[in-house]
């Protein structure tokens, strides 16, 4: 038995690009997940529900770790996918802690088919009509290290994460460059350097990576010629001017006297972006403290279709998070402790532990390329008609946003905007 526990790293990259660009339709190959053994629809839905439960438990401590007063973007789905892959090789209390925190219905190996079915369905539905959703996993191991064939097989066949060998021990910099190059390629260059100096060293034996990239075009877009400065009220009541898009768009909206909910679908309406704008005492922070799957479900149940003159600020920012303290605080403790972590399903010994879990996510929301989608107007051809203008709906104060798969409810990205200028 090795007397010196070997650290693993879990690296998570998420690039969410709402550049809203019109794209030429092309035939995409089936997602890699579709070639893996597929779980039932019921199993996939059960996993999506579990992922949502994890998302709402993960979001508050992630925001706190990022700095609770600022803008934040995270991908709970990416965290869950990566740690589920770790769970494939976990046993004992380490396994039970991972599964409890992630709300998994079973071990990472047993939920592999459900994961594949869910990823296949989400990617297939979202990668159409000019949109692109890519979910990719990879496994980077120290060359020559004796991982169990059963562990490698589950990750390759269930999670489309075949083993790739690098040399952490004698050339950690080259290994990092290879991993970062893979992430950059999978996120279309949006996340070129997921791993930072110190994330990997000569003792690293395994890095598991999940990358998510989404580029979508609104079903109803905005004319850049209408974009201008509009007031935005910060959490402390300060009024600032923010670059704001506006246009007559078809949306779904609802909420209550203390919460406005706006849903903008992407082309094809497989995915949608939801904005939740609280107006009650306590503002965004107060609303976030009440977040749960039931609260979201109740808010979404109020949505009805309508046409409005929507004012939506443009925003763009990146969040980089070290997640070991976050996941430890949620109850996933043993997997990060040398000689305590039980990852014997990976190599048959008690000599591995997870040292680092990092995530970098990026979001851009703007109106590029959507003039064609927004340029047609019934009013233009009805010069003699008297048509009442649609009501204004302004998202002009701090809000929570998420992007989700409409059918399963799976949450891919989640975040907050407290100041769209940053």
Image (cartoon, rainbow, N blue to C red):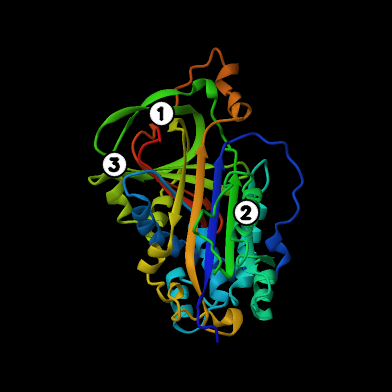
Q: Earlier in the sequence, mark 1 or mark 2?
A: 2
Q: Nearer the viewer, mark 2 or mark 3?
A: 2
As rendered, which of 33 and 86 lies closer to the eye?
A: 86
Q: Residue furthest bottom?
A: 1
392 vs 163: above or below: above
Tell me: 219 left or right of 329. right
Image marks 1 and 2: residues in contact by CB distance under 8 Å:
no
Q: Give me the residue at 50% from left, 83% from top.
A: 3
Please tell me whether mark 2 sits on a helix, a strand or a loop: helix
Residue that badge 2 annotates: 177
Residue that badge 3 annotates: 279
Q: Earlier in the sequence, mark 1 or mark 3?
A: 3
C-alpha gap between disc 1 and disc 2: 52 Å
* Structural crowding at the residue carrying mark 2, measured as other residues with C-alpha within 10 Å and reported as few (<14), some (14–19) or many (≥20): some
Q: Which mark is residue 353?
A: none
As rendered, which of 169 and 231 lies closer to the eye?
A: 169
- Residue 327 % position (x, y): 41, 66
Residue that badge 1 annotates: 391
As rendered, which of 330 and 142 lies closer to the eye?
A: 142
Q: Residue furthest front?
A: 170
- Residue 238 % position (x, y): 26, 31
- Residue 258 % position (x, y): 29, 44
Please tell me whether mark 1 sits on a helix, a strand or a loop: loop
Tell me: 94 left or right of 176. left
- Quarter in which the C terminus is drawn: top left
């Amino acid at each position: 038995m090795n007397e010196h526990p070997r650290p693993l790293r879990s690296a998570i990259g998420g690039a969410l690009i709402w550049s809203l660009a019109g794209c030429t339709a092309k035939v995409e190959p089936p997602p890699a997940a579709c070639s893996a053994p597929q779980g039932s629809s019921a199993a996939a839905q059960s996993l999506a529900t579990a992922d949502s439960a994890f998302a709402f438990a993960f979001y508050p401590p992630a925001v706190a770790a990022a700095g609770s007063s600022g803008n934040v973007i995270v991908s709970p789905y990416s965290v869950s996918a990566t740690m589920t892959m770790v769970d494939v090789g976990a046993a004992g209390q380490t396994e039970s802690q991972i599964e409890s925190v992630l709300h998994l219905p079973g071990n990472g190996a047993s939920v592999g088919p459900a994961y594949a079915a869910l990823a296949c369905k989400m990617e297939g539905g979202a990668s159409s009509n000019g949109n692109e959703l890519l979910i990719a996993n990879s496994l980077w191991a120290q060359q020559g290290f004796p991982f169990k064939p059963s562990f490698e097989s589950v990750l390759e066949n269930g999670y489309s994460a075949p083993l790739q060998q690098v040399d952490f021990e004698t050339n950690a910099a080259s290994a990092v460059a290879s991993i970062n190059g893979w992430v950059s390629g999978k996120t279309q260059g949006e996340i070129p350097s997921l791993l930072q100096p110190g994330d990997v060293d000569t003792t690293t034996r395994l890095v598991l990576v999940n990358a998510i990239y989404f580029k979508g075009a609104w079903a109803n877009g905005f004319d850049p010629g209408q974009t201008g400065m509009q007031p935005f009220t910060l959490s402390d009541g300060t009024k600032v001017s923010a670059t704001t898009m506006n246009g007559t768009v078809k949306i779904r909206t609802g909420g209550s006297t203390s919460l406005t909910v706006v849903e903008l679908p992407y082309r094809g309406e497989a995915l949608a972006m939801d904005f939740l704008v609280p107006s009650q005492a306590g503002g965004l922070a107060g609303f976030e403290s009440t977040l749960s799957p039931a609260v979201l479900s109740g808010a979404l149940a109020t949505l009805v279709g309508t046409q409005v003159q929507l004012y939506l600020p443009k925003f763009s920012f990146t969040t980089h998070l070290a997640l070991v303290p976050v996941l430890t605080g949620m109850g996933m403790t043993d997997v990060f402790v040398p000689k305590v972590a039980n990852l014997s399903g990976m190599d048959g010994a008690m000599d591995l532990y997870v040292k680092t879990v990092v995530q970098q996510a990026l979001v851009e929301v703007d109106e590029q390329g959507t003039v064609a989608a927004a340029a047609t107007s019934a009013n233009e051809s009805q010069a003699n008609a008297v048509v009442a203008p649609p009501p204004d709906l302004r998202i002009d104060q701090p809000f929570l946003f998420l992007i989700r798969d409409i059918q399963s409810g799976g949450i891919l990205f989640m975040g907050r905007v407290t100041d769209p200028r940053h």
